[in-house]
Image (cartoon, rainbow, N blue to C red):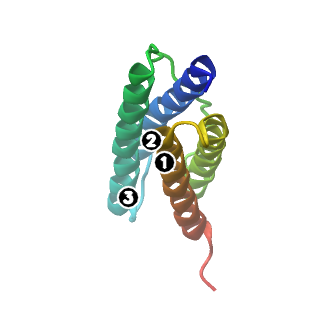
Amino acid sequence: MDNKKVIAVMNKILEHELSGVVRYTHYALMVYGHNRIPIVKWLRDQATESLGHANMAGEHITTLGGHPSLKISALLETHKHSINDILKESLVHEKAQVENFHQLLKLVEGKVVYLEEYARQMICDEELHISEVEKMLRKPE
């Protein structure tokens, strides 16, 4: 296994999770209307989950002898804060993270079981999250 490549991808994952903390916190602050309370709770839960994922990625980086990044991935302020816009932006964010985990899986598959299982579990978690957001975006028939 190429530790440098794995650490680089893990730092990309860490940066993306940390941007998720900022992104979901911001979204929670921008929700208005009669559905505000449950949506804000859901967004804050996503921010908390992103922080947990960032901590886990950082732990794996240091286990491999790497140095966790202090950066966050790019944040684009679209100034669109309808619930649908927030959910669509969230979907883009989550799909990008799934790709990061697929990159990690390719690097560790068949080489390091704990990282392979970590990547697979995170892909599973992120795909379930994506499916939930997609359901939230569907219009009732």
* Dot in front, 3 or 1: 1
Q: Which residue is mark 1?
A: 117
Give percent across and percent down for residue 3.
57, 20
Near-viewer residue (35 or 89): 89
The Cα atoms of the two marked residues, 3 and 1, are separated by 36 Å
Query: Disc 3 or 2, which lies upstream in sequence?
Result: 3
Circles 2 and 1: CB atoms closer than 8 Å? yes
Q: Quadrant of residue 109?
A: top right
Give percent across and percent down for residue 107.
64, 34
Residue type marked 3: Arg
Residue extending furthest toward the front: 111
Is 107 positioned to the left or the right of 20 in the image? right
Residue type marked 1: Glu
Please, what secondary structure does the residue beneath circle 2 have?
A: helix
Please, what secondary structure does the residue beneath circle 1 have?
A: helix
Q: Which residue is mark 3?
A: 36
The Cα atoms of the two marked residues, 3 and 2, are separated by 39 Å
Q: Quadrant of residue 42?
A: bottom left
Give percent across and percent down for residue 62.
39, 20
Q: Quadrant of the C terminus?
A: bottom right
Callout 1: few (<14), some (14-19), or many (20+) C-alpha neighbours within 10 Å? some
Residue type marked 2: Tyr
Callout 3: few (<14), some (14-19), or many (20+) C-alpha neighbours within 10 Å? some
Callout 2: few (<14), some (14-19), or many (20+) C-alpha neighbours within 10 Å? few
Q: Which residue is mark 2?
A: 114
The Cα atoms of the two marked residues, 2 and 1, are separated by 5 Å
Name the residue located 62 percent from the left edge and 75 percent from the top edge.
Answer: 139
Name the residue located 60 percent from the left edge and 43 percent from the top edge.
Answer: 110
Q: Is residue 85 above or below residue 105?
A: below
Please, what secondary structure does the residue beneath circle 3 have?
A: helix
